[in-house]
Image (cartoon, rainbow, N blue to C red):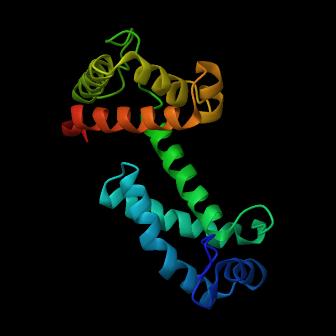
Amino acid sequence: MTTNGEQVGTTNFSRLIEAVGADRDRTAFTALFDHFAPRVKTYLMRAGADAAQADELAQETLLAVWRKADSFDAARATATTWIFTIARNLRVDRFRKEWRDVSTGDPIPDSVDETAAPDVTLSDAERGVRVRAALRQLPPEQVKVIELSFFDDKPHAEIAKALKIPLGTVKSRIRIAMNRLRELVSDLS
């Protein structure tokens, strides 16, 4: 076993990815899937996803490995780093998509889509009010990183630079804020 996470026992994950990329080797992909799917799911659950969402994102991650295997470059990253980066990016993309329409501005929309059913419009407006109320319960430094990350689509490194705080602090604040928001609006899902 090597310390860089690239090889376990006699399995070299970089070679397996290269085999998938070059030859669409199903046996190599099965070995990758069997090893990484449960680990990616655990990682995603620790990052705040529920079990069902983590399972779905883990499958999407390994599907992306299948599709993008030919772009893997062992000189740039280990197989493990590459796969977990895909998982992280999918998780961030999913979260941004879910939270894109959330705003910290006015609690009630200026206009109502009259083509939508009244109960759907009311439910969406109530959801927006609840999320904005939950955001107001967070400390200002957490709200700021949430706004920059999810509403302004800023990368974590750019947020760290703008706020003049370490990258790890940005990530920690986002994680803590998201866990708290999840608690505050858990009945909305």
- The residue nearer to you, when weighing 47 against 150, is 47
Judge left or right: residue 88 versus residue 183: right
In the depicted structure, whether residue 115 falls above or below residue 44: above
The answer to whether residue 124 is above or below residue 47 is above
104 left or right of 17?
Answer: left
Vertical comparison of 8 with 186: above or below: below
**Of all residues shown, which one is farthest toward the front?**
3
The image shows residue 6 at horizontal and vertical percentages of 64, 75
Task: Give how far across and how far down residue 125 sits, in percent.
Answer: 29, 21
Residue in the picture at 51% in, 32% down: 170
Q: Position of residue 3 (x, y in %)?
A: 61, 72
Q: Is residue 26 left or right of residue 151?
A: right
Image quadrant containing the C terminus: top left
Q: Residue at x 36, y 56 (%)?
A: 45
160 vs 135, left or right, is: right
Residue sitting nearer the eye, 188 or 125: 188
Q: Residue at x 41, y 21 (%)?
A: 143
